[in-house]
Structures are given as structure tokens and as C-alpha cells.
Amino acid sequence: MNSSSDVLVIGGGAMGLATAIELTRQGAQVTILSRNFQEAALHAAAGMLAPQAEGLEPGPMLDLCLQSRDLYPEWTSQLTDLTGLETGYWPCGILAPTYADAPPRFTGDAEWCDRTTIHQYQSNLSPDIIGGWWFPQDAQVNNQRLAQVLLQAAQQLGVTLEEGVNVTGFETKNHQIQQVQTTIGPWQAQTYLLATGSWSQELLPIPVTPRKGQLFAVQAPRQTLNKVLFGPGTYIVPRHNGRIVVGATSEEVGFAAYNTPGGLQSLLATALRLYPPLADYPLEKCWWGFRPATPDEWPILGHSPYDNLILATGHYRNGILLTPITAHLITDLIMTGQADPCLANFSWQRFTPSSPATERLALAHS
Ligand SMILES: Cc1cc2nc3c(=O)[nH]c(=O)nc-3n(C[C@H](O)[C@H](O)[C@H](O)COP(=O)(O)OP(=O)(O)OC[C@H]3O[C@@H](n4cnc5c(N)ncnc54)[C@H](O)[C@@H]3O)c2cc1C
């Protein structure tokens, strides 16, 4: 029997690592059981911090995303102070060009650019672009670097990280997890955190399913773009070193762990139309990942059917953005036992048969 005295985190991706770091900073003893660090969507993502470009409706989800975007500068600079490693956080703004007249949907931090303005502002866009929205507060982080920084920070702070360990099930009694079964035997802790992303249904019947995304990257000879382009059907994310990440398909094909010619073809067509210079840059690599999707596209956070199991999963396409706020809210919940009122909006119970959200969803799909 293995035992970690305070918190056992299942899954060492974005949520697992960031929350383990925060818990440890606040004095908890934390162990992470991680099946495969490399399969985490944390690595596969594009790293946009885009609550506004994503067009989220006003409400609890947009509020959560905006709060998390606000945490990013300090959160990443603390991680850099601790590890000496850069995360590539870049408040570069996001430009959302469009081919057709767009109604002025956004207010506040968004600015509409007409045809002349947008082509002056960003050269070499498709001549078919007739205007677009500029979101100066949206940003990006180099999520591949962030993954390394989080891993190093966790190790430096003394989090016990067991890589290559698959959690296969829970043993429960009286609404409590007694222990978890793993490929290296049972583990016990006072509190358990489920942070298993797209694979959450393997352990608990909550509606989190994989939504596959395919991406590719090119290496520009120099930094030719200095802002993210969020176009119809594609986004183009320049890094400081000239690398340009292009994403992403959105496919309901289960865990089909490979790139496909069809996926890449559609991505290439939309990206090259939006920003033609991409056509001539050396193609560096292509890859894929699985977004943990929920029926309403909001994460599942907080309490679970078991008293000592906390949930941090289902972050879908905004998980990199939501990492710092998730780590903060979940750590508070575990350390104080008090749930921030905002967590009520993200409870697993919204998917129980009689909840208003489930009824709304059923109506929407009828
Ligand atoms: C193509 C693509 C593009 C994206 N772009 C963006 C973006 O631009 N901006 C943004 O904010 N978000 C983006 N995302 C979403 C973001 O990457 C995810 O929401 C986020 O990584 C989810 O974090 P997580 O910790 O829940 O899951 P993950 O990061 O996937 O980590 C889960 C981990 O749990 C482990 N695990 C699973 N089951 C078990 C088990 N039984 N036992 C032990 N370990 C287990 C897995 O091995 C994995 O390492 C994108 C995702 C994809 C796929």
C-alpha cells in the first residue's frame, strides 16, 4: 500500500500540475499519479488566452476566463522566479479577421477594424479579408514551455511525481474513496483530485469526451507576425522564435491518435487562405491532441459524488487559459473546505437528470 498523506492528484497535465504546485505552496503534501505526461492536451494546445476572441457569451464562463487571463502575468512570473525558466507568456493581442460583414458583436476591449485599417495593421492577409476585430487584452503562452516549467516547479517544490502510473479504479465506501487502484498497486490519501482531462470517464461517469484537434507548425525565417490571427476555421499563433503554430481541427472521432491527410488538408486550406506567406515556410511538424469536452463546453469543478474526491476536468478548448484560476479555486476548496460561490456554476450536478442545464441541453438537441 502506497500512501501520500494529504492529496493524491490523478493526472499530471495542466490542471494536475498547476494545482499540485499551489497546494504544495500552501503546505500540503502532494503526490501526482500520471499515466503519460506526453499525452496531455497541455502539450498539444496552441496556448491562446482568448476569452474574447473565442466569443464566449457574457456569464459565469466568460467571467472565469477573464479572471484567469488577469492572473496570467503574475502567475507565470512567479513560476519563472521559482524555476529560472520562461513560459513564453506574451500579451500580444488577438486579431480576428473576417471575410464577411460582421455585426458589431463586441464591446469594451474589442475594436472593429475596417478593410483599410486591418490590412495596414497586418500586412499579407488574404485580399478577401474585409475587416476584423482586434482584442488587445487577449494573449498567448507557449504551452509547450509552460509544461516544462510546471513540471520543474512541481519537482522543485517537492511534489512526488509518479510517471507511468495508470489509475484504474476507485474503491469506495459510504460516499468516500477508500483507495485508488493503480498499475503499481493501491494508493491512499486524505483527498483525491481528478484531473484526468479527456480520459475522465474511464474513472467516473461524468460527461467528458475527447474532441480531437490536429495542428501543424512552420518555422518562419524571422518573426513575421507579432499577434495571434484568429480567423474563420483556423488560428495562427506566432512564437517569439519565429515558429508559427497553426490549429486546429475539431473532430468527434474518439481517441484516434494520429494526423490525417483530410484533417491537415482542411487546416492548410483555411490557414493559407487567411495568411498566404505560410505557404513558403519550412513545415516543422504536425501533431494532434484531445480537448476534454463537456456538453455545455464549461469545465466541471469542485465537489463530486464522493466526499473526498474533488473534480477539475472538462476544460475543453480553454484549459490553458483556465489553468491558474482552476489551481487557485481548487486549492482553496481543498485547503479550507470552503467552495468559492462561483464553483456552483461548474458543478457536476448540472448534468444529473433533473438539473435545469440537463433539461436545457435535452431541449436544444430535441
Ligand atoms: C488541439 C488543441 C488546441 C488547444 N488550444 C488551446 C488554446 O489555444 N487555449 C487554451 O486555453 N486551451 C487550449 N486547448 C485546451 C487545453 O489544452 C486543455 O483544456 C487542457 O490541457 C486540459 O487540461 P487537463 O489537465 O484537464 O488535461 P490534460 O492536459 O490532457 O492532462 C490530463 C493528464 O491526465 C493523465 N491521465 C488520464 N487518465 C489517467 C489515469 N487514469 N491515471 C493517471 N493519469 C491519467 C493523462 O495521461 C494526461 O497526462 C487545446 C487543446 C487541444 C487538444
Image (cartoon, rainbow, N blue to C red):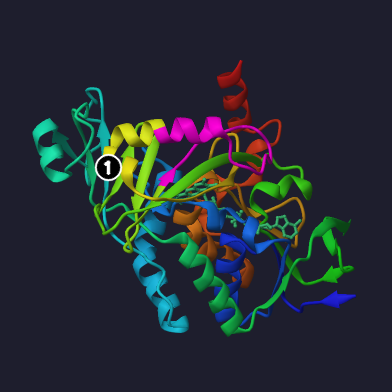
Q: Nearer the viewer, residue 222 or 122?
A: 222
* Image location of residue 132, percent across then percent down: 22, 35
Q: Nearer the viewer, residue 117 or 278?
A: 278
Q: Which residue was labeled with disc 1?
A: 277
* Quadrant occupied by the C terminus: top right
Q: Residue at x 76, y 42 (%)?
A: 205
**Magenta segment:** 246-268
- Residue type for callout 1: Pro
Q: Left of 310 or right of it: where is 151?
A: left
Say whether residue 258 is magenta: yes
* Quadrant occupied by the N terminus: bottom right
Image vertical order of residue 92 relative to residue 109, above or below:
below
* Image location of residue 250, percent across then percent down: 53, 35
Q: Residue at x 45, y 45 (%)?
A: 61
Q: Residue at x 83, y 71 (%)?
A: 188
Q: Quadrant of residue 172?
A: bottom right
- Classify mark 1 as within 8 Å of ligand 1 or not, answering yes or no: no
Image vertical order of residue 18 relative to residue 104, above or below:
below
Q: Quadrant of residue 358?
A: top right
Q: Nearer the viewer, residue 113 or 29?
A: 113
| Element type at mark 1 | helix
Image vertical order of residue 141 relative to residue 163, above or below:
above
User: How many residues crowd mark 1 within 10 Å: few (<14), some (14–19), many (20+)?
Assistant: some
- Residue 173 makes an appearance in the image: no
* Image location of residue 182, percent across then percent down: 85, 63
* Image location of residue 103, percent across then percent down: 23, 25
